[in-house]
Image (cartoon, rainbow, N blue to C red):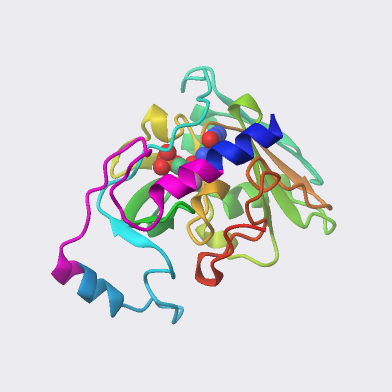
Amino acid sequence: MQKKGKISRRTFLAGAGGIMVGIGLPGVFVKLTDAEQLALAAETRRDGRPRLPPGQFAVKKIQDMGGSPGTATAGNWSLRIYGEVERPIVLSYRDLLNLEQAQITCDVHCVTGWTLLDSKWSGVRLTTIMEMVKPRKTASFAIFEAAAGYTSNIPLTRISKESVFLAHGLFGEKLPKAHGAPVRILIPDLYFYKSAKWLEGVKFTDRDEPGFWETRGYSNSADPWKEERNH
Ligand SMILES: Nc1nc2c(c(=O)[nH]1)N[C@H]1C(S)=C(S)[C@@H](COP(=O)(O)O)O[C@H]1N2
Ligand SMILES: [Mo]
């Protein structure tokens, strides 16, 4: 199974390679005009990094990258938050909506090359959840568990936790099923495979647990500005 995943992904990458025709991709790219691309190339983020990471191209519409959706609806979804924490909890969708809500406008970067600029998400910050469950000092990683066994992992000390969201809204609407409804994780500054759709659990751990793509040839650290695509 692992081998199969790796190969199909590589074939997929080859199909998307640089030329932006979108062959082999589930969606069709809506590209920027030449003028927009020039302006974008000159843009710098607040943190001083270029707006567009190396080797990426900007698109105007989010791509549906597929995956195995969960069967949960808002009515029966629950999220287990556990592991190296003082107070493990299980949240319903309603519980999540009753927590402090936040919005973020950010860019997301798929390892296959597309970058969606200015995507608008709503949800709950991971830090809000962390205040509730109180991770122990030993908790250095968060593992995101999604439907059908998909997982992703992040180190809690080396990334900006404030921008990590449990997202339930996209562009002012309920998050569509294809993009991870009822709730997905959003980690804007790492390649988008870290942003697990159809989220079911968040586990805090003292040891790293490389996730679905991280164990199939993709980078564990996944920094788009360092082009950490493969390992
Ligand atoms: N559960 C789950 N989450 C997932 C995936 C997946 O296959 N299953 N694919 C990842 C990858 S590789 C990408 S690029 C993004 C795509 O999200 P999108 O379909 O909303 O664009 O979701 C990520 N999260
Ligand atoms: Mo991806």
Where does the N terminus fall, quadrant-wise?
A: top right
In the image, 114 versus 122, the foreground residue is 114
| Left or right of 135 on screen, residue 187 | left
> 97 above or below 152?
above
Q: Is 117 on the left-hand or right-hand side of 6?
A: left
Residue under the point 33% across and 51% down: 120
* Residue 71 highlighted magenta (yes or no): no
- Residue 79, image x and y in percent? 62, 31
Q: Position of residue 45 (x, y in %)?
A: 39, 76
One can see residue 80 in this view: no
**Against 140, is 148 above or below?**
above
> 190 above or below 12?
below
Reply yes or no: does residue 22 show up in magenta: yes
Span of residues in magenta: 10-36
Q: In which quadrant is the C terminus drawn?
A: bottom right
Majority secondary structure in the magenta region: loop
Q: Nearer the viewer, residue 62 or 139?
A: 62
Rendered location of residue 146, percent (x, y): 61, 32
